[in-house]
Every structure is written in structure tokens, then in C-alpha cells.
Image: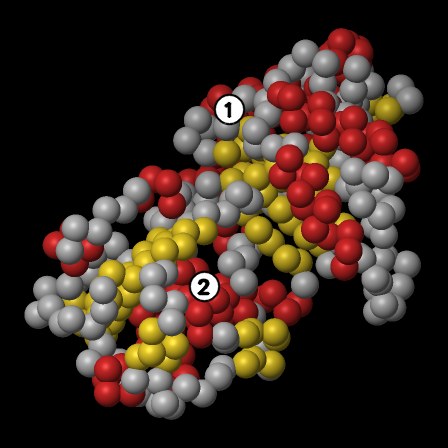
Amino acid sequence: MRVIGPEEIRDFQIVIAAAATDVESRAADELRKYMREITGIEIPIVADSAPHRDREILLGRNRRLDELGIVVDWQALAEDGFTIRTEGERIAIFGGSHMGSLYGVYGFLEDFLDCRFYTPEVRVIPRRERGLQLPSNIDTTQVPVVKFRELYYTIAKDPEYSAWHKLDHHDTDWGMWVHTFHPLLSPDDYFEEHPEYFSLVKGKRIPNGQLCLTDEGVFRILVDNLRKRIVGNPQAQYWSVSQNDTFGYCECDRCAAVNEREGTPMGSILEFVNRVAAEFPDKTISTLAYQYSRPAPAHLKPADNVNIVLCTIELNRSRPIATDAGAASFRKDMEDWARITDSILIWDYVIQFSNLVSPFPNLRVLQPNLRYFVDNHAVAMFQQG
């Protein structure tokens, strides 16, 4: 271990790029704030054009790294990965293109300075007024296997808590989020004149079911309406084109033929969604594999820019999926999807709907389920609490 005394801490400066990103600037502010709480010492933030010091915290992507010969594989860090490394008297914290540097700061505070952030109201910030103890040679890199991580609990809405725990939010990262057939083609606007746009169920067109996904008018209108939304929110990468939160999928001859060929009502959905995705090659079009559409198709595969949101709503949430006999049909569907796509978001229900505020002892279920999902190509998680 190396001990950094108060006088040495006063010699440090936090170095960021002269043209630092908003995330890098935020990371520097957070590091300075927490170091002040821990040590009582205010460490200045300077641009990488400032004179060198022997003691520095190099934060984010800046030219000081190149000047000191610190080689970084930025591509390997992706969006949210980070590295924490000591180089002599310097500490380097740098990360991927999205939130990596900020996550690196929080990782440094938690892993090496023993800070804890249990709730927005309950934190542990140790006082180290006599100095800091750090390992002599730190060299750690963390790159998340799960690229999108949302915890749908009220506590995770706190911005700093969420960032500390490296969480995402669909309301900022997604242009539209699930159950979007009606928002994209509303029965209020179209059913009276065009009942053929909507599901044929037991010989009757119904406005409160799904869409007829083999109708060319449906495709044209939905694509036009989606395009308008994308133009209005060009920063969003993910756009859901997915079934409504109900049943009543279309049984017309054309839809039925596709579904029979594919062995699942997902057939007509995925064929439609793949066509939509071809219209927006620079966006990711997401669709639900949910309830009646959960089984994967026999022949179709998702296009490269199609994401599958696979839902666990039917499962027993108190038993690990990999070993629960009652989860056999889900395991088949999960593993079938894993064979045909590498882009699966799991909508996992870590909740007891029958009594929302009762104790629900599922702690020992969460980790094995996450491992099972990752082993089967899940790259995104939405944990509904």
C-alpha cells in the first residue's frame, strides 16, 4: 500500500481535456466534490494545456495520456467501460465514449476509497483527513457485458444514485418504448374508414387488439408516422415497433399463413418489423417477444438493426430460471432466440404483483437469472420492480 498524506494531496490537480465532454466535466466535478468530503482538501481542476505536475489525476480522454505514453484501447472500452491505473505519482481514470469516465470516478471512489451509496439519503463517505491509502500498482478495467441496464424502481430515478450504480433509463435513451402499435397507427384515427388495418379476430375486425401486419396501408402509414417521430428526436437510437399490451393478433389469411409457416404469431410481427428496420438502417428498431409472441420464428431471423425485448412475465420469480421446472418453455424460447440474434433485451419482472409492498425474498434468484440471460446473448436488461 502507498500512503498519500495531506500535503501530497494538496499537490494534486485533476486534469481534463481543454475541450472536455459534458460527462468528463461532470466526472471532474464529482471527483473534486468527493475528495473534498473525504480529505477536506479542494483539488483544482485544470485543462491538459496546464503545466505538468508530478502528482495528477488524469481524467477522461486528454492529451496528457499521450504525452506520458499511456496507451489506451478506446475501442475496447466501448461506451461505458473504464480503466483506473496508477502511473508513478499519477492516477489515470478514463473511460468509453458515453459514460465511461464518470463511471470510472465512481468506481474509484467505491473500490479504492470505500465510499458507498445505498440510497439517495444514505451514503457512507469515510473521512481520511490524515491521508489516503491506495494499492501501489492499480490497473483495473471494467467493461459491462450488459450494454443497457435499467432498474425500474423509484430509487433509481435519482440522477446521482443512478449514475453511481451505472444505470440507464429508457425515457432518455429510447424514442419510443414498447406497446407502440396504437401510438403509431391509432384506431381513433383510422378504424372507422379502414377497419382492414386492424386485427381480424374470429372473423371480425377489432379496434382494441393489434394491427394487420400484412396490410400495405398499415406499413406505409406506420413508417411515415415513425419517420416523423425520428425527425423530431434524432438523438434517440432505439425505437420500438411492438404489439399493444393486449391479445387479439390478426387471423386474416395473409397473417395466418406467415404465422403458420413460422410456427408462432411472432412470424408476422418479425416479418413486418424487419421491413420497418430496412427503412431506418441507422436506427435500432425494437419489438416485443411477449406472451403470445414469445416463441422465436422457425425460419425468420431479426435484421441486424432489430432488437428483441423478451419478457419473463409468466415465470415464477422466486426460483432461478435455469433450474425451475416450470420455466422449461421459457428456456426453450430464450435459447431459440439466442441462436438467431445477439440483440436481446430482457424485460425481467423482479416484483410480486399480488402485493407490491410485501417482503419478496428473491435476492438469491437475481444473480443466477442475470447470468442465464447473459449466457444466452442478452445485452440489455430492464428490471421491473
Q: Nearer the viewer, residue 276 or 104?
A: 104
| Quarter of the rendering containing residue 245 | top right
Above or below, 142 relative to 1: above
SS for dot 2? helix
Residue that label 2 marks: 107
Indicate which disc residue 304 carries: 1
Q: Is residue 68 left or right of residue 35?
A: left
- Image coordinates of residue 278 in percent, x first then y, are 49, 21
**3D distance between C-alphas at marks 1 and 2:** 33 Å
Residue at x-position 71% and y-position 23%: 336
Is residue 232 visible to the viewer in this orientation of the structure?
no
Q: Residues within 10 Å of mark 2 (few under 14, many from 20)?
A: many
Whether residue 41 is visible, yes or no, is yes
Label 1 Cα neighbours within 10 Å, binned few <14 / some 14-19 / many ≥20: some
Looking at the rendering, in which quadrant would you find the N terminus? Answer: bottom left
The label number, if any, that marks residue 157 in the structure image: none
Look at the image and tell me in which quarter the C terminus lies. Answer: bottom right
Image coords of residue 254 (percent x, y) = 74, 11
Q: Position of residue 88 (x, y in %)?
A: 23, 64
Q: Residue 211 or 14: which is nearer the viewer?
A: 14
Can you name the residue that lies furthest to the front here?
A: 1
Q: Which amino acid lies under the numbered mark 1 shown in the image of this protein?
A: Asp
Taking depth in this image into account, of 260 and 369 the one nearest to the observer is 369
The residue at the point 62 percent across, 46 percent down is 381
Q: Amino acid at mark 2?
A: Gly
What residue sits 54% from the left and 25% below the top?
276
What secondary structure is marked by label 1?
loop
Residue 224 lies left or right of residue 67; in this view the side is right
**Foreground mark, 1 or 2?**
2
- Indicate the quadrant where residue 34 lies: bottom left
Which residue occupies 42% across, 66% down? 108
Sequence-first disc among 1 and 2: 2
